[in-house]
Image: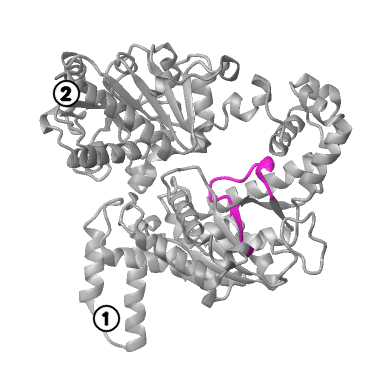
Amino acid sequence: MPLHKSVGRWEDVRFEKLHTEIFQSATIASVAVAEEIASLIRSRNANGEKTVLGLVAGNTPMHIYAELVRMHKEEGLSFANVITFNLDEYYGIPRESSQSHWTFMHECLFNHIDILPGNINIPSSSISASRIEQHCADYDMKIKACGGLDYQILGIGRTGSIGFNEPGSHINSGTRMLMIDHLTRSDASKEFHGIENVPKRGITMGVGTILKARRVVLLAWGNKKADIVRRAVEGEMSSEVPATYLQTHHDCTVILDEAASECLTRVKTPWVVGPCTWDEAMQRKAIVWLSSITGKSILKLTERDYNDHSMSSLIAQEGSAYRLNIKMFNVLQHTITGWPGGKPNADDATRPERATPARKRVIVFSPHPDDAIIGMGGTIRRLVEQGHDVHVVIQTSGCNSVSDSEARRFVEFAEDFYEYQTGEEASHKIYNHVNDLLTGKTEGEKDAPVVRKVKALIRRGEALASLRFMGVQDTNVTFLDLPFYETGTVQKNPISRKDITRMVDVIKEVRPHQIFAAGDLTDPHGTQKISLDLLYTAIASLKSEKFMRDTRVWLYRGTWGQWSVEQVDMVVPMSPDELRLKKRAIFFHESQKNDTAYLDEDIRDFWQRAEDRNKNTAEVYHSLGLADYEAMEAFHRYYF
């Protein structure tokens, strides 16, 4: 069924001013969009007509392009009669630069299909300043001469931008060059290895150009986009959020994965839009929300509070507010434990973890070398102190987030230290080779294998020092160096059998009673999400193993977020001293002071975010009427 023919009940979507479809994952959604595009192309091909597509670069459409390439190679989908116009391009960078949209489109799509080179149109990144205005006018005229855009793909920026149409853009604007918002540049800094390297200007189709397309599909993945999606879909039309202009389009669909939809009214507070099933998960979600709205702890909520906030059916189901309040207070109380590996010789009926075995084998998976410490450093220390056999498995080398200047500093140190120890001059052939490689490239360009190794060793040393400080033995730290990550750029390789095999082998070797892993959904194409998908794949292949019957999987959130209270199945309190020790452990990842892959923030920002999240979780629990702790690390259980 075409995406724009699938319509929800009015009661469910009455807050939404744009037709919106929610899919379980970005991959499933991307396949649905690719199928719609393919159907359009096949229909036009059958009639001898051309198809005019408006395309966009970036991580958001990557799976769409991969599926279109697959259809071309395996199903014979021909692009010989397709004309494409790209939405935008950075201004002032070489066309062949790894960050240019021209390079992205060719590497991800055009080089793998039978499209005619003359049918590919992308705004020029190097047109002279005196010719920009004419170049932009010609771009719009060429779209019109081709019969207009049949299908336009869009992403959405956190400013509400579509293309480089930032806040303040006019609804009738045409293709033009403009300044790129600081937040948009920050979000792009990972690809450019630093915001200072991100161009400040870009050429983009205007809002008016986009709205002339016969069909528009806006895509958004990950909870990082959830709030701006809500504003675009449910908010009033305004130049402050240019994506709201799409509300005027006659055939526009917003396509979301579940994470990007979480702020929509029908998802966040479904009881407000209509009847809902009051299972325990929904009750927890509603009561935490109601406590926040009323400013009351759970045990102080009244029937009037429930009735005034569209929850009368919940009270009718449970019998009374008093009974419901006691029930949900106990549910949340039972998520709190100072024994994340289980408390020996204790009644574990209401505890998150089993009492036996008293000494558990534990695997903590860390996508990057610092994720585990940032996400659950306090819990790691607690597990070690309570006698569990803790293994930390670092899935990728993390080399992509080490700056060239940091790598050069370590190479120079190694050279000087060699000369100090031996009294001989170092082999300048080796050191000069590495320095030449670093000097001859700009930040963000692909690293040579030897440079990647230098950067990987830097991260490896920091991880060992950090974990050693938290009590984990060096022999219990494993570095998988998964191949999907080892590209020398921020773009990842497809998952391979080697990636899965390494994950499976380490689980089989340890035979864990507990697995902890990062469950961050901020970036559905990011390292953490890929690493989690690999874990799920490994678990699925090991389900028949006897030892897996005794294995529980707990997900911590990564660098960017924290589980909300209604999602928490186990929360581990930390004292002020424990929080201080976690901070010191994070600071061992010193190379991240130059980690421009993380939006120009350094390890001090990582720590501050971790502290704020951990303290905020404790504050939320306290506001619900539970004990007052300094900080908490939260976990969500994954059932397989």
Q: Is residue 100 visible?
A: no
The image quadrant of residue 155 is: top left
Judged left or right of residue 281, residue 53 is: left
Q: Which quadrant of the rendered structure holds the N terminus?
A: top left
Residue 591 among magenta residues: no
For the point 57% across and 60% down, the residue is: 373
Q: Of the residues shown, which amino acid type is indicated by label 1?
A: Ala
Where disc 2 sits, the SS reads helix
Q: Of the residues shown, which amino acid type is indicated by label 2?
A: Ser
Where disc 1 sits, the SS reads loop
What is the magenta range?
A: 550-569
Instruction: Pick whichever, 181 or 382, lies toward us.
Output: 382
**Sequence-wise first label, 2 or 1:** 2
Residue 552 among magenta residues: yes
Q: Position of residue 468 (x, y in %)?
A: 57, 72
**Any mark on residue 130, and which?**
2
Tell me the crowding category of disc 2: few under 14, some 14 to 19, or many 20 or more residues within 10 angstroms, Cα based: few
Question: What whole-number distance in Å separates the C-alpha atoms at marks 2 and 1?
Answer: 53 Å
Q: Residue furthest bottom?
A: 423
Judged left or right of residue 53, residue 319 is: right
- Residue annotated with mark 1: 426
The image quadrant of residue 591 is: bottom left
